[in-house]
Structure formats: structure tokens, C-alpha cells
């Protein structure tokens, strides 16, 4: 794709996903086709989360003093908050913040709800709009000022281990979601200077865009006890003592929808995984002068039979030439189209076209074509996933020469380097390369060392000369694989 940015903006408009002409920067209108795509993605997401989270809905506004409570937290968001200062003509005594995220809305309530260890864990989530006055260049669905689809989960635990386990559980949930959407991801621990304000640590999912940049599509934060201490979230433990709770939160946004569009789409339009496609099958009657009624009757019969198996199907019976209908089908990302004309009908067959490969497959209408279509759905999902992962994996390069990192990234790749983990050294790497360290991935066999480091126990073991790697910058012993990329 030559000019990704142009392609991306065009497809959002042409495939009727959103209209970004709304007269406020960073805010757009969801159009019917886009709204349906969003709806089916949310359906899958909610199914995953409803298994062991409770869905809730908190107010949009946060009192100034609650937002101000968490010093570190406010520092993270103070430049990004929109404020409500008036009710009608009257200036409010207390300004109200429009949530940039909901910690400061939820946690004062958690403080009322959490009483005993028996109440824990608590696991909540909500899907809401949040507002961030982003100062970086805004882009539809990617960096917006109204995040319309902010899925935020918040959990409370009675001990550190359970909170750390929850981080792993959340990562598994997000993996399932992204796998279902065929979106490849790189999971890494964000460097300390890039973690969520107030968090002990942040784990992040980044995906790789066709223009060679990475996009953060989900984050999981272990909040430790920082927020519990700030918002006084305490529980009575087994021994009858009061302890501060341990918390995690994790979120994703419209960026997930942007990724589905950007990663699978091609020059003809959207390509969607069947599970979330607004229409999964489009039936196109090919009608000439004669035999139109029989063709339409058969199309209706196919439609009913697919519908009864739970497949979302539509007949494109608009009075226009088939070519235009094929064009619209390709643009919309519908996974399968069925063409049926009088000659096909006479032979009791139809032509099926896969959107992902544009391959034509003849189906026998006397056989069980519904299960054949279900099989093709599976194949499409696997094909999209394999293709996207292959593209990502092919674009990760290892380098042990800092001078070449910038050039490799300029050629649209992600670079993996060995790094000591020291903050000053990391910032120097970012300065020299003018790029971001996405995060670290623990190297095999070195995880133990990382844990020891975390608990501040000195590591006395000398690494084998063979397994020893040196930091790309300071040449001290490397403890991590760090990913460097051009980010959105
Ligand atoms: C939290 N609190 O807020 P996070 N436009 C689109 N997507 C965005 C934008 C934006 N301007 N800013 C962030 N995101 C925690 C976790 C509750 C839930 C997306 O975390 O600030 C990014 O994909 O990291 C980010 O990973 C996710 O929202 C969560 O935001």
C-alpha cells in the first residue's frame, strides 16, 4: 500500500465507517456500517468479559477534588482533561472533570463497596466514551479526543499475588479477543517512564500497521496499592485487621476497530473476519430478462436457510448492474458473496466468492451449503490471522548496532535489541535513535533474574559466557530484549 494514510482515510469514508467531518477536532460520527462493525466487535468482547467480570456504568463527570486526590495520577492526565465549569449561566462551585478514564470516578465508590476479604476479588468493566484533550496529531479511531469505545476493566484483590495473576488473566483475555479479530500483537512490559500514571507496572499490546508503525491497542496495569491508599479502599482480612486492597485495570479502545480495518483491508476495500462482519454473506441475483422470479425465489430460499443457521445474510436486490454490486461487496468487507443466475439455477448450483482471496467456488445447492459456508468462514479467519502474523513476524529484525537501528526502522521494521534495563541508558537509546522503546520482553532463562531484581535480592550467579549478551548501548550485561519502533 503506497500511501497508507490516504488509503485509511478514504476507506473510513467510502466503506461508511465514520464521518470525520464533525466540527470538533478528534471527534467523529459513527455511520451505520461502522456502527454495526463496532457492535459485533463489542458483542465478542462482552461475551469474553461477562464470564468473570460484572458490567457497570459510572457517570461521565468526576468531581474536581476526586480527580485531584491522586497526585501521580492527576499529573498524568492534567493536561488532557476537559472541564465542565458551568451549569447553565451559573458557574459551578466545584468544577467537574469529564472522565479521561474512570479510576477517579470508580475508586471512591469502591471504597464504600469493599468491606471484607469475602467481597474480593471484585471485577468490573464498562464500555463508555472518555475524553482526552490529545495534543499530538489526531487521527480517526487511532488518536481521538472522544474515545467512543473505551472498554475499561477494574479489579480489586486481597493480595499482591492475585493482582499479578489478574494481569496475566487480562493478557489472556486480550489475546483471545485479538486472535478472534486476527490482529497480531507484541506483548511487552512498558519501560518505567512510559507506564500508566500510578501503576506499579504496565503490560502493553502493540500491533504492527501497514505503514511500518506500531499502535498500542491495549494495556494492562498492575496498580499495586497506590490507588487503594489514595481512595481508602480497605478490607478486613482473615485475622480481622484492615489492609489496603490491591488493584489492576486494563483497557482498550476504538484503536482495535482501526486495527481490524487497517491490517486486513486491501486496495478494494475492507476485509473482515467473519465473526464480526456486519453482513457475513451477500447474495447477488444475476437477473436477465427472463427467469427473474425463479432466481429471486431461490435467493430468498438460500437467505432463509442461512439465516436459520444464525448467519447474517442480505440479498442485494438493488436495481443496478451486478458489477456495481460486486464493487460494493468488496468495499464492505463482507466475507462471502453468492452469485446466482438462471443458468446456475438450472444446474442447481451457485458461485460463491471469498472476499479475502477473491477465489470463486462452485456450490451445489442440493448439498448442505450452510456447513460449507461455515467451513469457509473458518478458513477465512485462519487465512487472515496467518497472513497478518506472517507480515508482522517478517518485519521484526534483531540488531546489535545502535547506529543502524534508525535506518532499519525507517524502512518500516520493528527492531529487537539487547538492553541492560537501566533507565538512563534506555532514554539515551531513545534520544540517539529518536524512537520509542516499546517495552521489554523477558529473555528465556533470564526471567528468574528479572524477578530477583524486582525483589531486590542480589543475583550472585555469573551467567555463562555463551549466554551472556551485552546492551546495545552501554555494553553492560543485557537483561532484556527491547523492542524499538516508530509508534503512532
Ligand atoms: C487506562 N484505565 O486508561 P490507557 N484515542 C484512542 N485510543 C486511545 C487513546 C486515544 N486518544 N488514548 C488511549 N487509547 C487505564 C486502563 C482504565 C483502563 C487506548 O489505560 O491510558 C490505548 O489503546 O493505557 C490504550 O492502551 C487504551 O486506550 C487504554 O488507555
Image (tube, grey):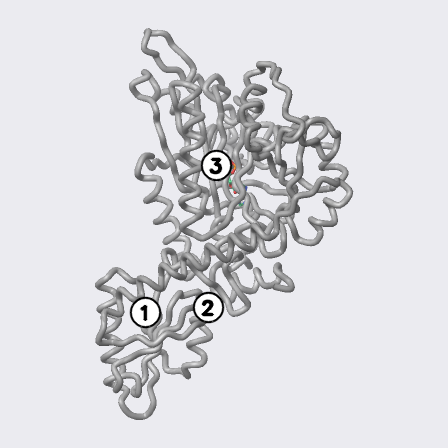
- How far across and down, in percent of the image, does residue 453 sit? 58, 20
- Ligand 1 near label 3 (Cβ, under 8 Å)? no
Mark linked to residue 357: 2
Q: Which residue is drawn at 62% across and 50% down?
A: 213
Q: Residue at x 33, y 7 (%)?
A: 239
Q: Nearer the viewer, residue 392 or 44?
A: 392
To which residue does mark 3 refer?
Answer: 87
Query: Spatial distance from mark 3 to mark 1, Cα to Cα?
Result: 47 Å
- The mark nearer the N terminus, 3 or 1, is 3
Query: Spatial distance from mark 2 to mark 3, Cα to Cα?
Result: 56 Å
SS for dot 2: loop
Query: Spatial distance from mark 1 to mark 2, Cα to Cα?
Result: 21 Å
- How far across and down, in percent of the image, does residue 478 sit? 66, 29
> To which quarter of the image does residue 123 belong?
top left
To which residue does mark 1 refer?
Answer: 314
- The mark nearer the N terminus, 2 or 3, is 3
Amino acid at each position: 500500500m503506497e500511501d497508507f494514510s490516504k488509503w485509511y482515510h478514504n476507506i473510513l469514508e467510502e466503506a461508511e465507517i465514520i464521518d470525520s467531518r464533525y466540527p470538533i477536532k478528534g471527534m467523529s460520527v459513527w455511520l451505520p456500517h461502522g456502527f454495526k462493525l463496532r457492535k459485533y466487535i463489542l458483542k465478542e468482547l462482552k461475551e469474553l468479559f461477562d464470564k468473570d467480570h460484572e458490567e457497570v456504568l459510572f457517570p461521565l463527570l468526576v468531581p474536581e477534588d476526586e480527580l485531584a486526590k491522586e497526585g501521580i495520577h492527576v499529573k498524568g492526565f492534567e493536561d488532557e482533561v476537559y472541564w465542565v465549569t458551568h451549569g447553565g449561566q451559573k458557574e459551578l462551585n466545584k468544577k467537574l472533570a469529564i472522565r479521561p478514564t474512570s479510576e477517579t470516578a470508580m475508586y471512591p465508590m469502591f471504597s464504600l463497596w469493599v468491606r471484607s476479604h469475602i467481597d474480593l476479588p471484585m471485577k468490573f468493566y464498562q464500555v463508555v466514551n472518555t475524553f482526552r484533550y490529545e495534543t499530538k496529531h489526531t487521527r480517526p479511531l487511532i488518536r481521538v479526543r472522544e474515545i467512543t469505545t473505551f472498554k475499561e476493566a477494574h479489579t480489586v484483590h486481597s493480595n499482591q499475588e492475585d493482582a499479578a495473576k489478574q494481569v496475566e488473566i487480562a493478557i489472556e483475555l486480550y489475546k483471545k479477543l485479538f486472535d478472534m479479530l486476527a490482529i497480531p500483537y507484541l506483548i511487552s512490559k512498558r519501560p518505567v517512564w512510559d507506564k500508566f500514571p500510578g501503576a506499579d507496572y504496565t503490560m502493553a499490546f502493540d500491533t504492527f500497521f501497514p505503514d511500518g508503525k506500531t499502535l498500542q491497542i491495549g494495556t494492562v496495569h498492575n496498580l499495586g496499592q497506590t490507588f487503594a491508599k489514595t481512595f481508602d479502599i480497605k478490607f478486613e482480612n482473615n485475622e480481622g485487621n484492615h489492609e489496603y486492597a490491591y488493584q489492576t485495570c486494563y483497557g482498550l479502545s476504538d484503536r482495535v476497530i482501526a486495527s481490524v480495518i487497517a491490517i486486513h483491508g486491501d486496495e478494494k476495500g475492507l476485509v473482515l473476519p467473519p465473526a464480526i462482519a456486519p453482513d457475513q454473506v451477500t447474495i447477488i441475483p444475476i437477473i436477465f430478462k427472463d427467469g427473474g422470479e425463479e432466481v429471486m425465489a431461490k435467493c430468498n430460499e438460500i437467505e432463509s436457510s442461512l439465516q436459520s443457521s444464525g448467519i447474517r445474510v442480505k440479498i442485494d436486490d438493488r436495481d443496478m448492474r451486478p458489477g456495481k454490486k460486486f464493487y460494493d461487496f468488496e468495499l464492505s468487507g463482507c466475507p462471502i458473496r453468492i452469485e446466482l443466475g438462471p443458468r446456475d439455477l438450472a444446474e442447481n448450483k451457485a458461485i460463491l466468492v471469498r472476499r479475502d482471496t477473491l477465489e470463486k467456488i462452485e456450490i451445489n445447492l442440493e448439498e448442505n451449503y450452510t456447513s460449507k459456508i461455515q467451513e469457509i468462514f473458518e478458513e477465512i479467519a485462519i487465512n487472515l490471522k496467518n497472513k497478518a502474523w506472517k507480515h508482522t513476524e517478517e518485519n521484526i529484525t534483531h540488531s546489535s548496532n545502535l547506529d543502524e537501528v534508525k535506518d532499519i526502522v525507517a524502512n518500516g521494521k520493528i527492531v529487537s535489541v539487547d538492553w541492560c534495563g537501566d533507565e538512563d541508558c534506555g532514554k539515551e537509546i531513545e534520544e540517539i535513535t529518536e524512537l520509542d522503546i516499546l517495552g521489554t520482553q523477558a529473555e528465556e532463562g533470564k526471567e528468574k533474574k528479572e524477578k530477583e531484581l524486582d525483589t531486590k535480592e542480589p543475583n550472585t550467579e555469573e551467567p555463562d559466557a555463551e549466554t551472556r549478551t551485552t546492551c546495545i548501548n552501554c555494553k553492560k550485561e543485557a537483561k532484556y530484549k527491547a523492542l524499538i519502533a516508530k509508534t503512532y
